[in-house]
Image (cartoon, rainbow, N blue to C red):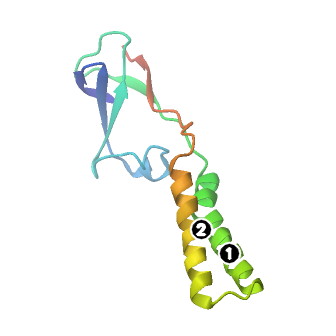
Amino acid sequence: MYVREVKDGKVVVAKARTSACGSCPAKNICLSDNEIKLEIDWCGEDLKPGDEVVVDIPEYDPLKVSTLVYFLPLVIFAVTVITGYLFRLKDWVTFVLALGSVFAYYSLFRFRRKDRKPPRILRKVS
């Protein structure tokens, strides 16, 4: 990746998008269709526009993300509906409770611990 801009302890790096981007772990944080741009905190050696750098972009587990975002809300909704029918609640009450439980899950999910590591510059290529 190449340095585009250096400002206030942050470095903007960019690289032209290639066909290999489909399997790249950073594809979800890319800002452009034809260029990958990242803004990275940096307090190391002096960098200037045009410098080539090696960037470490941590991967994430897509199975874990899919489970947290799609599967668990579905399970919560189903368990709430089944519980509502076991207690012989009215259908509309059961539905509202199920939607409310999924809403509560997403509200709590929003405040989860964010342990994801940001991209970082490893070194400058000479």
| 2 or 1: tag closer to the N-terminus | 1
Q: Is residue 124 above or below residue 100?
A: above
Residue 89 sits above or below residue 8 on the image: below
Dots 2 and 1: beta carbons under 8 Å? yes
Residue in front for this viewpoint, 71 or 63: 71
Provide the secondary structure element on which disc 1 rests: helix
Question: Which structural element holds mark 2?
Answer: helix
Q: Which residue is mark 2?
A: 101
In percent of the image, x 31 and y 30: which residue is there?
Answer: 13
Query: Which residue shows up at 38% across the image and 11% down it?
Result: 44
Amino acid bearing label 2: Ser
Quarter of the image for residue 37 reads top left
Q: Nearer the viewer, residue 64 or 104?
A: 104
88 to the left or right of 23: right
Please provide percent x and percent y for residue 84: 70, 81
Q: Could you tell me residue 79's position as x and y percent?
A: 71, 74
| Residue most extreme to the top | 45
Q: Please state if 92 lies on the left or on the right of 76 as rendered.
A: left
- Using a 10 Å C-alpha cutoff, classify the residue at mark 1 as few (fewer than 14 neighbours), some (14 to 19) or many (20 or more): many
| Identity of the residue drawn at 55% across and 70% down | 100
Where residue 77 sits in the image (x, y, percent)?
A: 63, 73
Q: Relative to residue 46, is residue 68 drawn left or right?
A: right
Q: Residue 90, how many percent across, how many down?
A: 63, 90
Using a 10 Å C-alpha cutoff, classify the residue at mark 2 as few (fewer than 14 neighbours), some (14 to 19) or many (20 or more).
some
In the image, residue 67 sits, relative to residue 36, either above or below, namely below
Write down the quadrant of residue 39 in the picture: top left
The image's mark for residue 80 is 1
- Quadrant including the C terminus: top left
Give amino acid for label 1.
Thr
